[in-house]
Amino acid sequence: MWAEAHGFKLLWIDTCCINKASSTELSEAINSMFAWYARATVCYAYYLHDVDDAKPAEGSSFAQSAWFTRGWTLQELIAPINVIFLSRSWTPVASKHTVAKLLQEITGIDAGVLRGPRRLQDVSVARRMGWAATRRTTRLEGRAYCLMGIFDVKMPTIYGEGAEAFIRLQEETIKRTADLSILAWGPRRDLFEVAVGYRTGIYPTPDDDMYLRQSCLLAQGPEEFAGARDVKPFPLDSLAKTFNLTMKRPQLLVSSYGVQIHLPIIEYQNFCVLAVLPCKQGHAFVALILRSQGPSPPTSVGIYSQTLVHISATSPKGTGFAARSGNPGGTSSAAFLQEYRARCALVYEPLDLERCIQRPIRESEVGWTPILQWDEIFIAYRLSHILVRFPPRPSRPSRKASMAPCKIMITSWTFSGLERANYRLLFPMSLPTFYEMTPGKQLCFIFTQVVHATNPYQYSAFAVHIAADSWRDHGARGNAYFAARGENEPQRQAAIWCMVNYCPPARYYRAHNRAMEVADWIATEWNKRRPAA
């Protein structure tokens, strides 16, 4: 009735005009839906049951409507030339042209794309994926199918394939565009944080689903692109000129063994390997952190660890971090276990790659310099390519002192000696301190120079990692096996190991300031939760 009153003779409604019992018709409609919307004279976002007749504004019922949280409405908003929003009383409250700026704040979609001057193809793949990061669909496969028109992709719809649909969407998108920002998703860290905190031998376990998903080259869902909306492609010739490389194209080939790709690779002596992507986030280049899975499997992506952050509450007012406020006598202290996940490293300038060198202290390696060069690598892009390792059951220890659970004491004279050597703990702590080491627990202490040394062979920072291997329950059958051997209860013990990573003189101010901001936030939260007494 509404369309007929405005002179239209033909009306198409997705929820009414598709025979979902026919898989052929359903697949054809889903593949053609974006084009149908684009050719429509007008699109009515009709009967928004949670929107009143008030003028759309920030915080209004219009801005908080569930319509903006649905996956399928994304193409309904972008594709048509004109969209008119109707309230629950069938009153037109706005069009996408009149409230384009408000829609940009609500959805993150550029106002230029909504109004028309800016082409959809001019927006990076990562940003377009980010538009759907917070949207939901009834079926898991719908997260991929509702984006096919956004990336001009045609593919058969197979309900029941689950997350495989989003993998196929990315594979088809890669075939149609040279924009590699599609690979720049997931958590990212400053290059200095990655270099100092890098550890080898950390592999995902079966119960760590998030780490498994982030170890793949391709994302398992659009929510992974929530932090990559401002990633933009960077011209290849400019990339080659910036890093003094020969111009090459990053050819990408999807195979059952993994994705074969040519990228600029840099490898450090501590096995930290970075692959620089032709895209930038702000003023920083985005580089994938590669993790070797051995000589046979393809390389996986990302690192994972846990860092114990120490903070001191300076006063009841919660003025922040003790070391920054100049008051070393904090009234109370606390330690928080901060999860450290990184899939990408941010490189602000090419010289950072050379400055963030890690290596053991060996005279033969003092003059070693890493080289950034094009290389061909295979990267895992499916969960089946990721090497999962079960934590080994520790053997019966000969010396109890090297096994967890136990207590570790950090003495005050240890830090006094380091201070005389011009090093200071990045986060303050009360001394002496006892730490309960249990299987799976990890500690990390980062030390930085108080005053930069002029000696090129003196390190500007180093990190001390102390950890206990994870303990795994062997189940009733396994416990019965060990009981038959005279072990009445499982050995809840794990070997403790320690490793030190070094970093020679580097520009770590960005990472240091970021760490200070995190410490300020933690201190504020600690003061909020502290009892009034």
Image: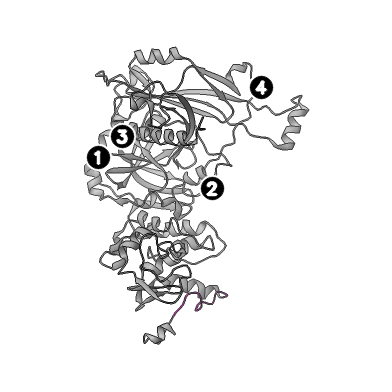
N-terminal label among 1 and 3 = 1
Secondary structure beneath dot 3 equals helix
Q: Please state which of the two labelled residues, at mark 3 or mark 2, is closer to the viewer.
A: 3
Measuring from the top left, give residue 104's x and y in whole percent.
33, 60
| On screen, residue 132 above or below 241 | below
Q: CA distance from mark 1 to mark 2?
A: 34 Å
Kindly identify the amino acid type of the residue bearing the numbered disc 1: Phe
Residue 283, located in which quarter of the rendered image? Answer: top left
Secondary structure beneath dot 2 equals helix
Residue at image location 44% in from the left, 12% down from the top:
413
What residue sits right under mark 3 in the picture?
Answer: 510
Which residue is more in the foreground, 245 or 317?
317
Secondary structure beneath dot 4 equals loop
What residue sits right under mark 2 in the picture?
Answer: 384
What residue sits right under mark 1 in the picture?
Answer: 243
Kindly identify the amino acid type of the residue bearing the numbered disc 4: Arg
What residue sits right under mark 4 in the picture?
Answer: 396
N-terminal label among 1 and 2 = 1
Magenta extent: 12-21
* Dots 1, 2 in contact, CB < 8 A: no
Measuring from the top left, give residue 514's x and y in whole percent.
35, 35
| On screen, residue 416 above or below 81 | above
Which residue is more in the foreground, 501 or 310?
310
N-terminal label among 4 and 1 = 1
Q: CA distance from mark 4 to mark 2?
A: 33 Å
| On screen, residue 314 above or below 339 | above
Q: Please state which of the two labelled residues, at mark 1 or mark 3, is closer to the viewer.
A: 3
Q: CA distance from mark 4 to mark 3?
A: 45 Å
Does any portion of residue 329 appear in the rendered image? Answer: yes
